[in-house]
């Protein structure tokens, strides 16, 4: 059965937040990090930092990479923003907010959440 895409919904150039390739015109985010060897970081269990100015595609890249990582089913990548914790001064409150976001992500993805 062939699925017909809703032709009334048009893609556009997005400049206000994370891009979604189904809704927005965009370059593939992973192409911008040529030579970064990102899968090596996972394989070798390394930490890394993504630092760039505003509106350069950090969130779009991370969400795209998480989808790619999750596609093979070997590991699970979870995208969680800590923006909700900006005004939080108590460590326990911030940790709970992050934990809740992880639980929400896991629930949407149908993944078990460790206690």
Image (spheres, rainbow, N blue to C red):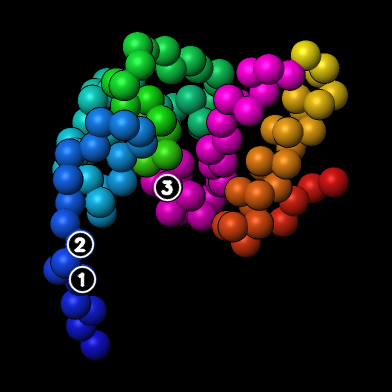
Task: Please state the extent of the stretch shown in magenta in the rendering.
Answer: 66-88
Q: Which mark is residue 9?
A: 2
Name the residue that disc number 1 marks: 6
Q: Secondary structure at mark 1?
A: loop
Residue at horizontal 51 percent and vertical 31 percent from the top: 42
Residue 112 location, quadrant: bottom right
Residue at horizontal 68 percent and vertical 17 percent from the top: 87
Name the residue that disc number 3 marks: 67
Specify few, some or many for label 2: CA neighbours under 10 Å numbering under 14, 14-19, or 20 or more: few
Residue 86 is one of the magenta-drawn residues = yes
Residue at horizontal 36 percent and vertical 36 percent from the top: 18
Q: Is residue 30 left or right of residue 49?
A: left
Q: Is residue 93 left or right of residue 47?
A: right
* Of the two numbered discs 3 and 2 in the rendering, the one whose residue sits closer to the viewer: 2
Compute the Cα span from label 3 to label 2. 23 Å
Residue 72 is one of the magenta-drawn residues = yes
Q: Earlier in the sequence, mark 3 or mark 2?
A: 2
Report the front residue among 72 and 59: 59
Work out whether 63 lies above or below 44.
below
Q: State the image coordinates of residue 1 (x, y, percent, origin top left).
A: 24, 88
Report the front residue among 39 and 86: 86
Q: State the image coordinates of residue 53 (x, y, percent, origin top left).
A: 35, 11
């Amino acid at each position: 059965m062939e699925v017909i895409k809703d032709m009334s919904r048009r893609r556009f150039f997005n400049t206000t937040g994370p891009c979604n390739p189904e809704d927005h015109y965009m370059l593939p985010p992973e192409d911008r990090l040529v030579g970064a060897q990102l899968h090596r970081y996972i394989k070798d269990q390394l930490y890394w930092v993504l630092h760039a100015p505003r509106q350069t595609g950090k969130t779009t890249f991370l969400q795209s990479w998480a989808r790619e990582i999750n596609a093979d089913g070997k590991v699970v990548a979870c995208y969680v923003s800590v923006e909700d914790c900006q005004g939080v001064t108590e460590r326990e409150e911030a940790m709970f907010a992050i934990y809740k976001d992880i639980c929400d992500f896991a629930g949407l993805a149908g993944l078990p959440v460790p206690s």
